[in-house]
């Protein structure tokens, strides 16, 4: 069974940095695009960044120049380096991945989420 486990969230002051990680485990043959989403209380989940298997990245306008998404295919891990954090970056951050499992099926998986709180 495929699982995604996030880590690295926490409480940080505005202007600070955090690095989130999301490790995939289970019967995985390949991972296509990897995503980071976030959800603040009372709002819809929004796409923050994504990275393709070939390393092409896209970012939400609100995080461009401050966040960097990267991946380590050997470790089946995606990262989100967050710098110059603002209070409006507060929320639960989720990784999401398109994974081909051991049964040769492409499915979309979500992690359990990790809380990021930025204090002013």
Image (spheres, rainbow, N blue to C red):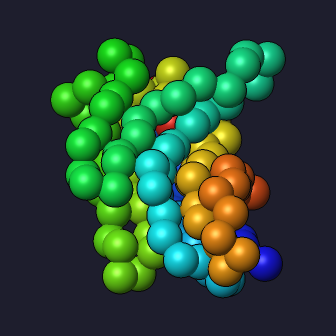
Count how many numbered circles sit on residues in the image.
0
| 107 or 10, nearer to the observer | 107
Q: Residue furthest front?
A: 104
Establish if 46 lies above or below 10: above
Q: Where is residue 23 in the image (x, y as percent from the top left)?
A: 54, 72
Quadrant for residue 62, please give it.
top left
Q: Position of residue 85 (x, y in %)?
A: 37, 35
Residue found at x 67% / y 51%: 108
12 displayed left or right of 24? left
In the picture, the quarter occupied by the N terminus is bottom right
* Whole-percent x, y for residue 44 in the image: 72, 19
Toward which corner of the image does residue 104 lie, by quadrant? bottom right
Q: Which is nearer the eye, 30 or 11?
A: 30
Above or below: residue 12 compared with residue 87 = below
Residue 87 visible? The answer is yes
Residue 68 lies, with reference to residue 107, above or below; the image says above
**x, y percentage for residue 7?**
57, 66
Q: Which residue is drawn at 35% across and 46% down?
A: 51
Q: Which residue is drawn at 49% across and 45% down?
A: 35
Judge whether residue 81 can be spotted in this image.
Answer: no
Residue 32 located left or right of residue 24: left
Horizontal relation, residue 97 to residue 69: left or right: right
């Amino acid at each position: 069974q495929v699982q995604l486990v996030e880590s690295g969230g926490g409480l940080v002051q505005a202007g600070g940095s955090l690095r989130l990680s999301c490790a995939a485990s289970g019967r995985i043959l390949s991972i296509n695009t990897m995503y980071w989403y976030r959800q603040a209380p009372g709002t819809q989940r929004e796409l923050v960044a994504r990275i393709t298997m070939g390393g092409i990245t896209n970012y939400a306008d609100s995080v461009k120049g401050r966040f960097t998404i990267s991946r380590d295919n050997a470790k089946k891990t995606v990262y989100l380096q967050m710098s110059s954090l603002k209070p409006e970056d507060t929320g639960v951050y989720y990784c999401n991945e398109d994974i081909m499992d051991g049964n040769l099926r492409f499915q979309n998986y979500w992690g359990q989420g990790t809380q990021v709180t930025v204090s002013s």
